[in-house]
Amino acid sequence: MAERFDLIVRGGTCVTPSGTVKTDVGARNGRFEALGDLSRAEAAVTLEAKGLHVLPGVIDSQVHFREPGSEDCDTIATGSTGAVLGGVACVFDMPNTNPAITSSERLAWKREFVKGRIRCDMGLYVGASKENIAELAALEREPNVCGIKVFAGASTGNLLIEDDEHLEKVMRNGFRRIAYHSEDEYRMRERRALIKDGDPYIKHMEWRDVECAVRCTKRLIALARKTGRRAHILHVSTAEEMELLKDYRDLATVEVLPNHLTAWAPDVYDRLGGFAVMNPPIRTKEHYEALWKAVREGLVDVIGSDHAPHTKKNKQNPYPHTGSGMTGVQTTVPIMLDHVNAGRLSIERFVDLMCTGPARAFGLVGKGRIARGYDADLTVVDLKKKRTISNDWIVAVCGWTCFDGVGVTGWPVATVVRGNIVMREDELIGEPIGRLARFGDALAPAAR
């Protein structure tokens, strides 16, 4: 009697822990059950993948789906829809909403709210504030919490911890990796006087300059070393930070964004105006080149999108009254596949940065690799497919992407979440079946 699976993906080139091989993949009950020749096996659903690359489901470990509070920018439903259309099978959603996710009550609300709304799986960040430090250790023990988010530079509401005293207290309360927005609030306050209403958008790079990022990262990793608390430095944007972080590989993981790997100043501000404004800023080409060097040398652990939508009206406001942030969850896979085709990274390094890396850094259970027993999440891509990204394709409520009109080679053609095909050739399949992801308790403090 033929072995039977819920799903068989046939004939694709699979990136597995053992190497990149042409093989079939079989899934049953939401998990991978077999890799190999399954030509005699049967399945309820078959996905023919000849000529395609079959990757572990991409994990976007930094998204801002804006709900509650800014539903005119995006929502959990539309954000997760954009994710699966863009080949992303799991996301980690940030806490800087209104109200923010900073208490057990707000966390319980969000865990319940996302049910039936999300098309991909989702992990949840908890935000740190000066008022909730004593609660953080308990909050992060919830199995769906990926980590704590700290804004060392200004953010929404009370999610700002700029001083070393409170930063150290946060680090001493809990055990999960802390993800940091690393820009020095004190220097930004000093430099705000440099900015006048109506200044060109490129002044954003001058206000939140390289030293803002470097000074804050130095402080954060010094405190992390003192306390033994593991750190994840989000959206690293400078050559100087990369040089600094290479000496903290036992303690700190490093994220880079497609935005900083794809554009540089002044060109990006000339082309996009206010749509190029984000924190930390897109910088000059020397920093772009340093980030790619860090990718090649293995210093970068994770690529996340930092999907942070604002309305078109907000992005078109005169500087400095411009929303800081770009959409990204739907475009990260095609943009990075284009970099693969350009020879800037291999498809195996793509998987390491966007699948295995996020799972490893945050202790995500059962995701990030094509291996027996793991969740059957897949991102199936056509490396030869040529497409032009357009605003019409974007499903975020705000309706725009900074990559509008950009031609790419490489495109996600199917997204599989726990053995369910949820997107195929730009078509959404079925109702939302996303669940909250689970995170392990194995992230003990680093050795001192």
Image (cartoon, helix red, strand yellow):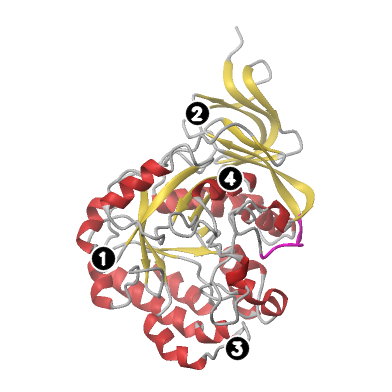
Dot 4 or dot 3: first in sequence order is: 4
Dot 3 or dot 2: first in sequence order is: 2
User: What segment carries the magenta color?
Assistant: 402-408
Mark 4, other Cα within 10 Å: few <14 / some 14–19 / many ≥20: many
Taking 157 as reference, is 379 above or below it?
A: above
Q: Which amino acid does label 2 sit on?
A: Gly
Q: Name the residue under label 2.
A: 30
Is residue 404 one of those drawn in magenta?
A: yes
Q: Distance between the residues labelled 3 and 2?
A: 53 Å
Dot 2 or dot 1: first in sequence order is: 2
Residue 154 percent coordinates (x, y)? 40, 75
Circles 4, 3 touching at the beta carbon (< 8 Å): no
Q: Name the residue under label 3.
A: 199
Dot 1 or dot 4: first in sequence order is: 4
Q: Which amino acid does label 4 sit on?
A: Thr
Dot 3 or dot 1: first in sequence order is: 1
Taking 72 as reference, is 290 above or below it?
A: below
Q: How far apart are marks 3 and 1 (CA)?
A: 37 Å
Q: What residue type is labelled 1?
A: Val
Dot 2 or dot 4: first in sequence order is: 2
Taking 160 as reference, is 367 above or below it?
A: above
Q: Name the residue under label 4.
A: 81
Q: Name the residue under label 1.
A: 170
Q: Distance between the residues labelled 2 and 4?
A: 20 Å
Q: Quadrant of residue 250?
A: bottom left
Judge by depth and name the residue closer to the eye, 394 or 383.
394
Q: What residue type is labelled 3?
A: Asp
For mark 4, give the secondary structure. helix
Mark 1, other Cα within 10 Å: few <14 / some 14–19 / many ≥20: many
Q: How far apart are marks 2 and 1 (CA)?
A: 37 Å
